[in-house]
Image (tube, coloured by chain):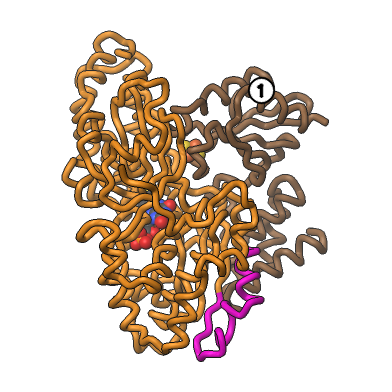
Amino acid sequence: MLSAESLEKINREIAKYPADQKQSAVMSALAIAQDEKGWLATETMNFIAKYLEMPAIAVYEVATFYNMYNLKPLGKYKITVCTNLPCALSGGNVAADYLKQKLGIGFNETTADGLFTLKEGECMGACGDAPVLLVNNKRMCSFMSNDQIDQLLEELRK
Amino acid sequence: MTQPVQIILAGVDPAEPDNWRLRNYLKRDGYVALKKIIANKIPPEAIIEEVKKSALRGRGGAGFPTGLKWSFMPRQYEGDKYLVCNSDEGEPGTFKDRDIMQYNPHILIEGMLIAAYAMGVKTGYNYVHGEIWKTYERMEEAVEEARQAGFLGNKILGSDFSFQLYNHHGYGAYICGEETALLESIEGKKGQPRFKPPFPASFGLYGKPTTINNTETFASVPWIIRHGGEKYLQLGRPNNGGTKIFSVSGHVNKPGNYEVPLGTPFAELLEMAGGMRGGRKLKGCIPGGSSMPVLPGDVMMKTDMDYDSIAKAGSMLGSGAVIIMDDTTCMVKALERLSYFYYEESCGQCTPCREGTGWLYRIVNRIEHGKGRPEDLDLLDNLADNIQGRTICALGDAAAMPVRAMLQHFRDEFAYHIEHKKCMV
Ligand SMILES: Cc1cc2nc3c(=O)[nH]c(=O)nc-3n(C[C@H](O)[C@H](O)[C@H](O)COP(=O)(O)O)c2cc1C
Ligand code: SF4
Ligand code: FES
C-alpha cells in the first residue's frame, strides 16, 4: 500500500515513542503517506490504522483535524498563501490576489490543467518575511513580490 | 540607545550558514553549562534555585515563572516523566522560535538537557510548528549531531544522567500551541485541550508528570547556568529578568527579530526595526501577539518592553510579537481578519468559543462590509463577555480580548463604518 521507503520513514517515527504508544506516529505517518500519494484516500488511512494498530476512526479524526492534510486530490502543487494580519500589513493580500489573477482561480480551487491548487493559510511563523507562501507543505517562499511569484510559477510549470 | 544583545540569537549571521552546527556552537561556549553541571555534580535543586533567582518567565505567552514551574515536578516519582518543548509557534506575529531552531538549535538542546537534569527526566519531545519543514529538518540534524557527540543519549559525558530527545512535527493547528492540546497531539489524537486541573506536572504526556516550556524559555537557560541567575536578572528589570526576542512585523522598514534587554523602551525597539515605513504615523500596536489587546500608538511610545510595563499600559507581553500598524490601517478590517482566525482555529469543544468566535467574525465582517447595525458594538462587547473566562482553554479569551481592546481604543472608527458604510482611513 505504501512504498518501502515510506514505511521505513514511518518506522523511524514510531521508534521515537514508547513501544506501547505507536499511535503517536500517526501525524507523521499521514504526512509521509500524503507525500507519496498526493492525498489521503480512505484506503490509505485504513492502511495506516492497521499499521499503527489503532482504530480507523481515530486516524480519520486526526486527518480531518489538522489543516495540512489533503482529504481529496489536489493540483500537483498546492500553494498556501498566508493572509493573516501581520502578513496582510506587508502585502499578503496583494500576493494572494496576484496568484488568483495569474492562475485564474480562487481559494480552494484547482487550475484546469491540474497543476495548481490555491489555499488561504494562517500564520506560518514567518511574518517578518511577508508575503510568504508554502508549496506542498514543505517549501516556504519568502518576500513574494509579484515578480517573485512569476518566477516561482514559471519554475513549477517546467 | 539600547543595543541589541545576542544571548539566544547568538550566531545568527546570514553570512555564516554553518553557524548552527555543533562545532560552531562549541566555540560560542556551547555545552559549557551542561559540562559544568556534570563535572561539579551540581544538585538539581540548586539549578532550579538559580533559575528562580534569574526571574526567567515563560516566553510562550503566559509569562509564568520558569523556576517555580520546574519545582512543581514530583521529585520522588518513580516512573517515567517527560519534558516537552513548545515550538508550535502559531501566534500570529511570532517568528522567533523558528530562528532559534534554524540558527542556534543546540542552545535549545542544551537548555532542555539542563531542565531534564534538574527535574530528573529521561525523555523529551520538541513539538515543531507544521509549516516550517526546513526548520524541523534542521532540528533533526542538530539532535543527531548532539547524539553522536555524546550530549544526548545514555550516560551523558560519562555521568549517570541519560536523556533522549525527539522532534515531533505538527501539521497545521494553532490550538496545538496550547500545552494540553499539544500533549494530546503528541499522543496521536486531535489537538483538543484538556480540562485543568489536573495540570501537566501531575498528569501530562501519556498521563505522566510533564513539564512544558517554550523554545525561547529553554534557550535562555544555558546562559543563566554559565553566568548565574543574579546576572541574568540584572540584564533586565526586577521581576522581568534577562533578554527577550521581539518579532517585529507590519509597517516598519526592517521587520525581524530583535533580542533586547527586558525593559527596553518601545521607541528604541521601533528604531532598531528601522522606524515606521514611509515615515508614517504609528496608529496602533499589538505588543504581544494577535491574542493580546491592541494599544494606541501614543500609549505604546511611552511604554517599556517588559511584562509589568506592558501590563500597566493595558496589554500583555505575550509571545513578544510586536505588530505595528500605521495610520493607513483600517482597524475594522484588521479585527475582521483576526476574528476569522480564531473562528477558523477554535477546536470546537466549548460552546461559547465554538459559537461565539463565529458570531464575532460574522458581526465584524458585516460591519466591514457596510452592513453593520448601530447595536452591533454593544453586541460585540456582550459576546466577548460571554466567551471570556467561560471556556476550557485560553483561545476563547484570545478571541475576545482583541475585540474588546479594539472597541475600547478605536470605537469611533467602528461607529463610522456602521454609520457611513465605509472606511474612515
Ligand atoms: C490558544 C493558545 C495557543 C498557544 N500557542 C503557544 C505557542 O505557539 N507557543 C508557546 O510556547 N506557547 C503557546 N501557548 C501557551 C502554552 O499553553 C504554554 O503556556 C507555554 O507553552 C508554556 O511555556 P512557557 O512557560 O515557557 O511560556 C498557547 C496558549 C494558548 C491558549
Ligand atoms: S476555548 Fe475554544 S479552542 Fe479552547 S478548548 Fe474550548 S473550543 Fe477548544
Ligand atoms: S502572519 Fe503570515 S506568517 Fe505570520
B400 vs B60, left or right, is left
* Residue A158 position in % (x across, y down): 83, 31
Q: State the quadrant of the C terminus of chain B.
A: top left
Look at mark 1 in the image and give the residue it sits on: A147
Looking at the rendered image, the quarter that the N terminus of chain B falls into is top left
Which residue is rendered at x = 31% and y = 41% of the image? Answer: B287
Q: Categorize mark 1 by other alpha carbons within 10 Å: few (<14), some (14-19), many (20+).
A: few
Magenta includes B158? yes
Q: Relative to residue A59, is residue B347 depicted above or below?
A: above
Amino acid tagged 1 = Asp
**Could you tell me which secondary element the residue under label 1 belongs to?**
helix
Q: Give the range drawn in magenta.
A: B140-164
Q: In which quarter of the image is residue B266?
A: top left
Colour in which the image shows chain B: orange
The residue most toward the left is B312
Q: Residue at x 47, y 87 (%)?
A: B39
**Can the viewer see residue B207 in this picture?**
yes
